[in-house]
């Protein structure tokens, strides 16, 4: 099977640098998500791999076949890269039937009519669309249009499929169902996939590995569990999950354990980078790790419960503690008033304060 390699890729729009030396590999049968905020470079990176954007330098190759090499001036056009593309807008021809949309790439490649028909029907049947072959895109639901776009990407058995925000046009409920269906499809077919998303939950659900981009560089890469449970920077910690962020001062350092202090309070935390006594710091803790306790104790603060919000599978609480605004999850409604909230020290991560 084929491995996609991207090495030290740079790309600018005029004087505006977008990609600043990005390198990664996509292994056979692996799903990698490019995750990041708007402007981080994730879609530009995907388009560069596809051949829709031209980098200024670097190298892109698939199983030894060079797609782009800035040093030797190689830049294969899109059609010679033979990658499956699924666009955010689906980009379906409105005046062509489902079958015609799916088979268009085969037609361009001059595949015989009989073979086209066979492969189109097979792709549609795989995705539960076989009975819709004669319909037009406007006669389909959003979810069905999404599957047609995916069938078009799969019909010529590409070594890698590239997906640009493939679920963003779906409503929240259908999107949640579709990400499970899409992950199942990719795994069952043994595909290699590179997927762009700005939704960290979607990235964690669909991928084997995540590349978190920030300002044109990879901030951190790893499995979903690594990025969520072992962030190496304040940016990664805050981007992944729902968090409380606490500004504090480092009162003491004891190896990887630090004491953070604020206005009338102290908390123990795990240092995720080198910190020194007296330094300004920021602590991050996931909402689900905060616990409402039954009284005072280690690493607990007394806070005023302002409101509780019912989310269906849990409650979300909003607390005030002096200048701090703190949130927590729980499974029971709670009355407004004074409560003790606990921050387990191993789950409370301390970083140097961002400049």
Image (tube, rainbow, N blue to C red):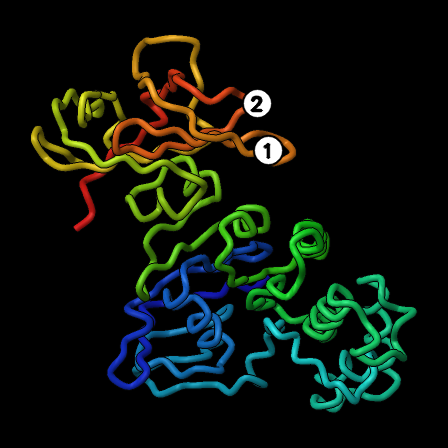
In the rendered image, the vertical position of residue 280 relative to residue 217, given as above or below: above
Residue 45 disc label: none
- Residue 201: % across, % down: 53, 47
Q: Nearer the viewer, residue 193 or 330?
A: 330
Q: Is residue 55 visible?
A: yes
- Residue 345: % across, % down: 31, 21
Give the secondary structure at mark 2. loop
Q: Nearer the viewer, residue 222 or 95?
A: 95
In the rendered image, the vertical position of residue 15 relative to residue 276, given as above or below: below
Q: Identify the mark nearer the N-term, 2 or 1.
A: 1
Residue 333 disc label: 2
At x 37%, y 23%, the residue is 304
Residue density around tag 2, few if under 14, some if 14–19, many if 20 or more, within 10 Å: some
At x 79%, y 68%, the residue is 141
Q: Is residue 183 visible?
A: no
In the rendered image, the vertical position of residue 189 relative to residue 281, given as above or below: below
- Residue 268: % across, % down: 25, 21
Location of residue 297 (image quadrant): top left
Q: Nearer the viewer, residue 147 or 107?
A: 147
Give the secondary structure at mark 1. strand
Q: Are marks 2 and 1 in contact (CB under 8 Å)?
A: yes
């Amino acid at each position: 099977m084929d491995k996609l390699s991207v090495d030290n890729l740079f790309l600018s729009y005029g004087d505006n640098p977008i990609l600043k030396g990005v390198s990664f590999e996509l292994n056979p049968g692996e799903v990698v998500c490019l995750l990041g905020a708007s402007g981080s470079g994730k879609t530009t990176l995907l388009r560069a791999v596809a051949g829709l954007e031209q980098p200024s330098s670097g190298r892109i190759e698939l199983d030894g076949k060079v797609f782009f090499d800035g040093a030797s001036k190689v830049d294969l056009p899109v059609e010679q890269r033979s990658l499956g593309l699924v666009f955010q807008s689906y980009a379906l021809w409105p005046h062509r039937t489902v079958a015609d949309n799916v088979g268009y790439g085969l037609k361009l490649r001059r595949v015989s009519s009989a073979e086209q028909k066979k492969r189109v029907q097979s792709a549609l049947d795989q995705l539960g669309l076989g009975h819709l072959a004669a319909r037009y895109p406007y006669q389909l639901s959003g979810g069905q249009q999404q599957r047609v776009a995916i069938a078009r990407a799969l019909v010529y058995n590409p070594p890698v499929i590239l997906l640009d925000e493939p679920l963003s046009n779906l409503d929240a409920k259908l999107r949640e169902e579709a990400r499970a269906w899409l992950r199942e499809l990719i795994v069952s077919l043994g595909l290699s996939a590179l997927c762009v998303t700005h939704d960290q939950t979607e990235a964690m659900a669909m991928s084997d590995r995540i590349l978190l981009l920030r300002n044109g560089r990879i901030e951190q890469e790893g499995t979903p569990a690594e990025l969520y449970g072992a962030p190496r920077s304040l940016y990664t910690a805050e981007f992944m999950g729902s968090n409380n962020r606490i500004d504090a001062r480092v009162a003491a350092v004891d190896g990887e354990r630090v004491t953070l202090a604020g206005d009338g309070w102290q908390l123990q935390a795990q240092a995720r980078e080198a910190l020194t006594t007296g330094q300004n710091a920021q602590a991050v803790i996931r909402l689900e790790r905060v616990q409402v306790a039954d009284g005072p104790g280690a690493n607990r603060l007394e806070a005023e419960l302002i409101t509780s919000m019912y989310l269906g599978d849990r409650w979300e609480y909003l607390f005030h503690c002096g200048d701090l605004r703190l949130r927590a999850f729980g499974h029971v409604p709670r009355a407004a008033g004074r409560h003790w909230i606990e921050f387990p020290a191993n789950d409370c991560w301390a970083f140097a304060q961002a400049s």
